[in-house]
Image: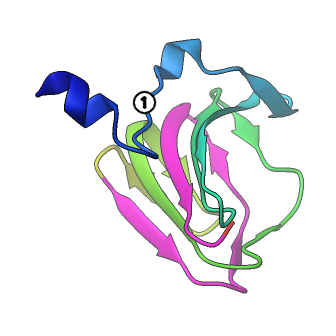
């Protein structure tokens, strides 16, 4: 049964530790986990203590969904501790930062 599950078309798995790291900005790293055929993406974003996005992060073409795995995430307006889920609709924006450092699971359902 296990091999039947893994043999299903499109069934994918990846270890975060083995995902390639791309530095987006100083102290902010992206680990891509999955990209769907329609452009949807799943990523892990790691932010060092004191790091921040250098400009507005605009959500285009679609929404952004974030789950705070570790640490505390700040969107430019308030802090969100580990265990928090955020949904940012298409066209919205924020300025990501973290005074303590954080790890986020980020999903873009529309790319």
Residue 111 appears in view: yes
Taking the image as shown, residue 70 lies to the left or right of residue 109, namely left
Which image quadrant is residue 86 in? bottom left
Q: Nearer the viewer, residue 47 or 32?
A: 32
Task: Give the percent coordinates (x, y) of residue 44.
Answer: 56, 37
Q: Is residue 92 magenta?
A: yes
Which image quadrant is residue 64 in? bottom right
Q: How is the image coloured?
A: rainbow
User: Which residue is pictured at 82% across the width and 28% down the height?
Assistant: 23
Q: Badge 1 is on which residue?
A: 13
Q: Which residues are magenta?
A: 84-110
Task: Give the percent coordinates (x, y) of residue 98.
Answer: 60, 42
Q: Is residue 40 magenta?
A: no
Taking the image as shown, residue 38 lies to the left or right of residue 100, namely right
User: Which residue is pictured at 61% across the width and 21% down the height?
Assistant: 19
Image height check: is 93 above or below 90? above
Q: Nearer the viewer, residue 8 or 109?
A: 8
Task: Give the percent coordinates (x, y) of residue 76.
Answer: 65, 64
Residue 78 appears in view: no
Give the position of the N terminus as an image quadrant.
Answer: top left
Q: Nearer the viewer, residue 10 or 109?
A: 10
Taking the image as shown, residue 52 lies to the left or right of residue 55, namely left
């Amino acid at each position: 049964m296990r091999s039947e599950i893994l043999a299903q078309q499109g069934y994918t798995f990846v270890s975060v530790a083995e995902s390639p790291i791309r530095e987006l900005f100083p102290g902010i790293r992206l680990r891509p986990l999955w990209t769907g055929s329609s452009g949807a993406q799943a990523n892990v974003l790691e932010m060092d203590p004191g790091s921040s996005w250098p400009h507005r992060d605009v959500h285009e073409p679609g929404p952004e969904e974030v789950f705070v795995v570790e640490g505390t995430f700040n969107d430019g307006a308030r802090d969100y501790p580990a265990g928090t889920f955020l949904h940012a609709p298409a066209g919205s924006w924020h300025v990501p930062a973290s005074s303590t450092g954080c790890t986020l699971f980020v999903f873009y359902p529309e790319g």
